[in-house]
Amino acid sequence: MGGVSGWLAAGAARPKFIILLVSGRVIGGAMTLVQERKARSVLAAVLRLAKYVATLVVLGTAYFVLARAGLMLASVHPSATPIWPATGLAIGCMLVFGLRVWPAVLLGAFAANATNELANLTPTNLLIASSAIAVGNTLEALISAGLLNLWANGRRAFETPGGVAKFALVALLPGTMLSATIGSGSLALTGAADWANAPAIWFTWWLGDVASALVVAPVVVLWATEKFRPFRFTQFVRSVVALAGASLVGLVGFSPLIVQTVQRTSLGFLAVLPLVWAALWCGPRDTATVVLTLAGFAIWGVIEGGGPFVAANLNDSFLLMIALVIAVAIPSLALSADISMRQRSKRGCGSASRICAPFSPRRSSASPRSTRPDASSSSTSASAKSCSARPPICSRSAFRISFIARTYRVCSSCFRMRFAPARGS
């Protein structure tokens, strides 16, 4: 009896032991899985932080280099230059990477202005002026990028003519004016500039920021966001022709290599040729690149004292050149956006007609039909024609139409298989 009762007690305790063992393994596996997920989340957070810091370092360095290059071309005041490509870089990067990269703009602008030599300024006033200018440049980029995200579809502003117009309006009015006001006001308040020269400093500052936003920002955004299509030799040749034509026009019309004459001044209109070619055949990205190329040749000519933009002083020459660049940049980008939108509409209409093709009436040899026109076939034919004439359909609507078309084909085939013998008899 004792042996039997002991065997029964051991058998009853065995399931409990198995349950405890299995539960312990499950809990241990769950804890291991939680620890692995925590480690992965920590590693992902570290990688995101490292990527963010690297982005700030690269952007801040690029901003500092471009700002110092622009200050080397200052004419009306050592801190006011009509060539300021850093503004376009800041706005473009905030559209691409988000507004969170503002610390790079702030530090880069402060470093560039703090290292600028300003006469009759104490270190304290230089620090105050540099800080104010850096804050103004940062607010300029934040306001411009924020308004573009809210009003002009952000980085996709260059896909439609309306988006280009909104981008030009944002570049002209709020952010650039605020930056020019803060910059010129800080210089006058700290004694770095006279109040009598403040209007000229403000206008030069504002026009340089506007030109940078309209010329540099589209290049940054389009090259960073536009998808690279598969290599096509025809498209490659068109892009090469556009860039080669821009370089040739820049050398002939704007460079200081040729002696400036009245006849050569009239050749400046040739800049329209590569711009129109790029807008019609290449797309917004190549159009923005052509505008930047022509602007580079024009700046080269003004610096060397040649080309059609030579005026009484260097600042007036730059302002004249900037006015022409702005005048050709906006219409070229708008035309390119319109052509690209029409091409997307054409491709959308083609895909919509292919999706609606199953609705077109068909004659099948397996199931004889009467020759009398059916109302359903005429309606499907009319729907197919109307669908092919519609504007482009979004991907969700195209999926719905495709699903309905396939359902219709399956149901019609099942109907014919079900009732074909009855009709034959």
Image (cartoon, helix red, strand yellow):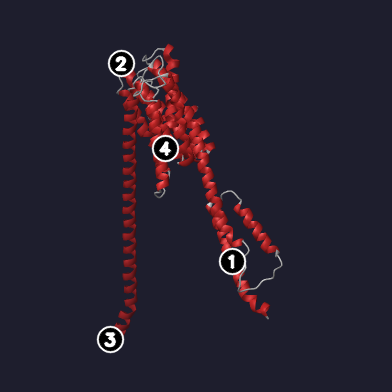
Which three-letter amino acid code belongs to the residue tagged 2? Thr
Q: Which residue is mark 4?
A: 242
Which three-letter amino acid code belongs to the residue tagged 1? Arg
Residue at 54% from the left image edge and 54% from the top image edge = 351
First in residue order: circle 2 vs circle 3? 3
What percent of the width, then of the height, locates residue 302? 37, 22
The secondary structure type at the circle numbered 3 is: helix
In the image, which is nearer the foreground, mark 2 or mark 3? 2
Disc number for residue 3: 3
First in residue order: circle 1 vs circle 2? 2
In the image, which is nearer the foreground, mark 1 or mark 2? 1
What percent of the width, then of the height, locates residue 151? 52, 37
Query: In the depicted view, which residue is nearer to us: 105 or 202?
Result: 202
In this view, 374 is above or below 298: below
In the image, which is nearer the foreground, mark 1 or mark 3? 1
Query: In the depicted view, which residue is nearer to us: 77 or 40?
Result: 77
In this view, 423 is above or below 262: below
Residue at 34% from the left image edge and 39% from the top image edge = 55
The secondary structure type at the circle numbered 1 is: helix
**How many other residues sit within 10 Å of disc 2, few (<14), some (14-19) or many (≥20)?**
few
Residue at 34% from the left image edge and 76% from the top image edge = 15
**Residue 383 shows up from this direction:** yes
In the image, which is nearer the foreground, mark 2 or mark 4? 4
Q: Which residue is mark 1?
A: 409
Q: Are marks 4 and 3 in contact (CB under 8 Å)?
A: no
| Distance CA(mark 1)–CA(mark 3) | 76 Å
First in residue order: circle 1 vs circle 3? 3
Q: Which residue is mark 2?
A: 122
